[in-house]
Image (spheres, grey):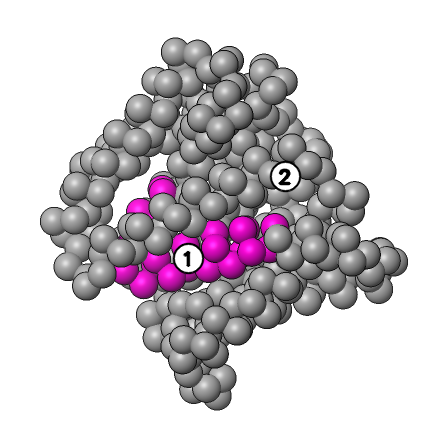
């Protein structure tokens, strides 16, 4: 088997597994408070990353200045973005959650345009933005009539806040590079955020004893950590190294579709023709935005990992 063939297999694994992690998160929060699930996931995942880089890669402990930056980014990316996205899944489908998360490149562009006065946004970019938002509107409209979960609108709002927060974090990362291995930094961000999330869980009182957490939740967490945060992350890096960036980035457009299809099969989420059409329109919009920005140096192409 050639290296390129292995890279395509890695890309396929990334696309499928990261899509299914939304369904795993949905299963995880069905019988356990969402922020408790997020805190446990980040604690175990972050600890594994830190231990690997300290004891295997011999990375030094971050300085106080670095820890401050890591804490700030951890709050944005894993407390607000991941935490709120996980909480949102209590009320909305995993497919809609994944689709809203996929919108973040569009909001990166809007934030750059409004707050940083970026002038190099063309007709193709605006077309992509309109399609992306329009597609979500179609899915939301159709979903609203088939979803009778109490707090549905609240779930959508939480997911939108999570996506916008991730967009802001992406801009910070692009504009200010920290002097630390980015994967090692991710581990620290997850670990620090888990402590904050644990604090939020205690303060709100929305938690259950660890001994009472059901097997379904532990199974979902094991899948999220082992498959979603470790195995697939390695596959993602491998595909990025051996495939063209535009090909390696295709996972970002496949993830939501996988989440929608698997969600309909595993957790019986409603799947209609309108939801599929709206999803395709949204992803076409995201693709057009990335395509329009691909050759621009002032705004990078955004299709980052493991979303939320």
Above or below 130: residue 269? below
Question: Which residue lies under the disc numbered 1?
Answer: 84
Location of residue 55 in the rendering, given as x and y in whole percent from the top left corner: 84, 64
In the image, 24 versus 109, the foreground residue is 109
Q: Report the side of 260 relative to 62 (left or right).
A: left
Residue located at (38% from left, 57% from top): 23
Looking at the rendering, the stretch of residues picked out in magenta corresponds to 73-100
Residue located at (68% from left, 67% from top): 47
Q: Earlier in the sequence, mark 1 or mark 2?
A: 1
Location of residue 54 in the rendering, given as x and y in whole percent from the top left corner: 82, 62
Location of residue 98 in the rendering, given as x and y in whole percent from the top left corner: 38, 46
Whether residue 84 is in magenta: the answer is yes
Packing grade of label 1 (10 A; few <14, some 14-19, many >=20) is many
Question: Which residue lies under the disc numbered 2?
Answer: 173
Q: Secondary structure at mark 2?
A: helix
Q: Quadrant of residue 126?
A: top left
In the image, 14 versus 207, the foreground residue is 207
Q: Secondary structure at mark 1?
A: helix
Whether residue 56 is in magenta: the answer is no
Residue located at (68% from left, 40% from top): 238
Above or below 66: residue 302? above
Callout 1–callout 2 Cβ contact below 8 Å: no
> Is residue 118 visible in this depiction of the protein?
yes
Above or below 214: residue 188? above
Quadrant location, the N terminus: top right
């Amino acid at each position: 088997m050639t290296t390129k063939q292995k890279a395509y297999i890695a890309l396929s694994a990334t696309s499928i597994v990261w899509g299914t992690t939304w369904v795993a998160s949905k299963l995880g929060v069905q019988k356990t408070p969402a922020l408790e699930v997020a805190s446990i996931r980040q604690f175990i995942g972050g600890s594994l990353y830190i231990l690997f880089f300290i004891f295997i890669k011999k990375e030094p402990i971050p300085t106080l200045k670095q820890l401050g930056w890591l804490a700030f980014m951890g709050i944005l990316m894993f407390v607000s973005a991941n935490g709120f996205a996980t909480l949102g899944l209590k009320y909305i489908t995993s497919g809609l959650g994944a689709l809203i998360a996929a919108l973040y490149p569009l909001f990166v562009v809007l934030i750059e345009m409004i707050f940083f006065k970026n002038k190099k946004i063309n007709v193709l970019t605006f077309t992509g933005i309109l399609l992306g938002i329009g597609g979500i509107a179609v899915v939301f409209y159709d979903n609203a009539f088939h979803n009778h979960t109490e707090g549905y609108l609240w779930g959508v709002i939480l997911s939108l806040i999570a996506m916008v927060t991730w967009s802001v974090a992406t801009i910070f990362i692009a504009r200010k590079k920290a002097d630390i291995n980015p994967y090692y930094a991710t581990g620290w961000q997850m670990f620090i955020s888990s402590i904050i999330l644990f604090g939020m869980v205690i303060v709100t009182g929305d938690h259950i004893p660890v001994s009472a957490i059901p097997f379904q939740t532990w199974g979902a967490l094991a899948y999220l950590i082992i498959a979603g945060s470790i195995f697939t992350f390695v596959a993602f890096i491998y595909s990025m190294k051996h495939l063209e960036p535009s090909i390696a980035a295709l996972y970002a457009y496949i993830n939501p579709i996988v989440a929608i299809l698997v969600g309909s099969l595993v957790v019986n989420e409603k799947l209609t023709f309108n939801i599929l059409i709206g999803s395709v329109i949204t992803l076409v919009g995201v693709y057009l935005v990335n395509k329009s920005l691909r050759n621009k140096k002032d705004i990078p192409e955004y299709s980052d990992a493991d979303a939320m």
